[in-house]
């Protein structure tokens, strides 16, 4: 069994400590142990009014990164040392950006501007600028809707950078395997993971048995269709014979051929849709964005 730095007794002691020293309603507190693998601090604080964070020593820039993500108005309740005892302190997060974590402890982060739910389809300006041309936010919202993600899902995203970011937020208790063939795209993907505080993204450079070995087995794959599509399908089906697929393409011939390819590999429940988005321009004329086909199915 995995050794845990914060066991149940320790967590209960910290809850009692903050209950005795603050007026926070414990029913509304989200527990987050970032000493465990793949836990996302920033998205959790953004979407919860109160988060009890358990962390080990060594996070030199933790408060700066939270401030940089727009969480400067949060209040942090904490004490000095590793035990839930002694005097309690509280400061606005924006006044703590030069501090780090020097001991394993719990801290209570209160966010007055927390959103109760995550809204899919972030604006493209939210993402890191780099080598990547991001799909429109409206189209991304439809794609994420077709993926039907749950909080604990393991997802593989091939050449879909902004889809990988939003999937990692939606599947906050799961894992996103982001496949980026291009080195510059991988670098931009790493910048986005850092910017959004996402620790549940694993970035690899190929879809093959060696690259996927050792990673969690995905239940769903999002693919941008390419010349290597069939090889990717074969590899992913070896990894999970019951894989679910969502494929994006701007090529009509590719879209038309995919139902037959799905049938060849035993992928059923095939659905093909086209997404069309037009936006009103400055001269009262509509400009149509690229209209992709989305093909989905389950093995």
Image (cartoon, helix red, strand yellow):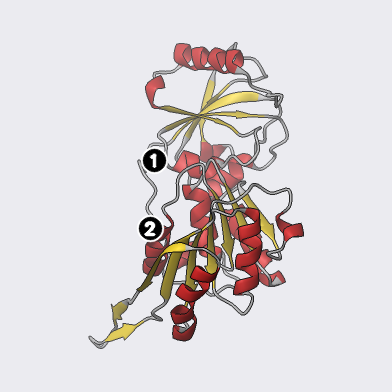
From the image, tell me which residue sits under label 1: 114
Say left or right for 40 vs 37. left
Task: Name the foreground residue: 90 vs 40.
Answer: 40
Task: Name the foreground residue: 24 vs 280.
Answer: 280
Name the element at disc 2: helix
Task: Name the foreground residue: 245 vs 37.
Answer: 245
- Image-quadrant location for residue 182: bottom right
Q: Is residue 63 above or below residue 140?
A: above
Q: Is residue 293 above or below residue 266?
A: below
- Name the disc covering residue 10, or none: none
Task: Name the foreground residue: 90 vs 179.
Answer: 179
Q: Where's residue 65, x and y in %?
A: 59, 47
Residue 228 in sight from this viewpoint: yes
Q: Is residue 78 above or below residue 85?
A: below
From the image, tell me which residue sits under label 2: 145
Say left or right for 247 vs 142. right
């Amino acid at each position: 069994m995995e050794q845990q730095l914060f066991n149940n007794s320790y967590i209960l002691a910290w809850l009692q400590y903050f209950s005795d020293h603050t007026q926070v309603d414990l029913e509304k507190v989200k527990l987050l142990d970032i000493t465990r693998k793949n836990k996302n601090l920033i998205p959790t604080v953004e979407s919860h009014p109160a988060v009890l964070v358990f962390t080990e020593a060594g996070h030199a820039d933790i408060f700066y990164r939270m401030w940089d993500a727009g969480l400067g108005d949060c209040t942090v309740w904490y004490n000095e040392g590793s035990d839930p005892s002694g005097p309690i302190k509280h400061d606005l997060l924006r006044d703590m950006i030069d501090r780090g974590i020097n001991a394993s402890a719990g801290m209570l982060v209160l966010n007055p501007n927390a959103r109760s739910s995550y809204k899919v389809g972030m604006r493209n300006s939210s993402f890191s600028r780099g080598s990547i041309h991001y799909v429109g936010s409206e189209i991304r919202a439809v794609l994420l809707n077709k993926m039907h993600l749950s909080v604990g899902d393991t997802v593989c995203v091939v050449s879909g950078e902004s889809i990988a970011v939003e999937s990692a937020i939606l599947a906050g208790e799961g894992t996103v395997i982001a496949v980026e063939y291009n080195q510059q795209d991988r670098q931009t993907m790493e910048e986005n993971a850092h910017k959004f505080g996402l620790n549940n993204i694993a970035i690899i450079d190929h879809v093959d048995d060696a690259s996927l070995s050792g990673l969690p087995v995905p239940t769903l794959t999002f693919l941008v269709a390419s010349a290597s599509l069939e090889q990717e399908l074969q590899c992913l089906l070896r990894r999970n014979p019951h894989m679910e697929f969502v494929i994006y393409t701007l090529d009509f011939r590719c879209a038309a051929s995919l139902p037959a390819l799905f049938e060849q590999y035993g992928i059923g429940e095939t659905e093909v849709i086209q997404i069309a988005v037009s936006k009103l321009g400055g001269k009262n004329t509509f400009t149509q964005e690229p209209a992709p086909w989305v093909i989905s199915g389950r093995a």
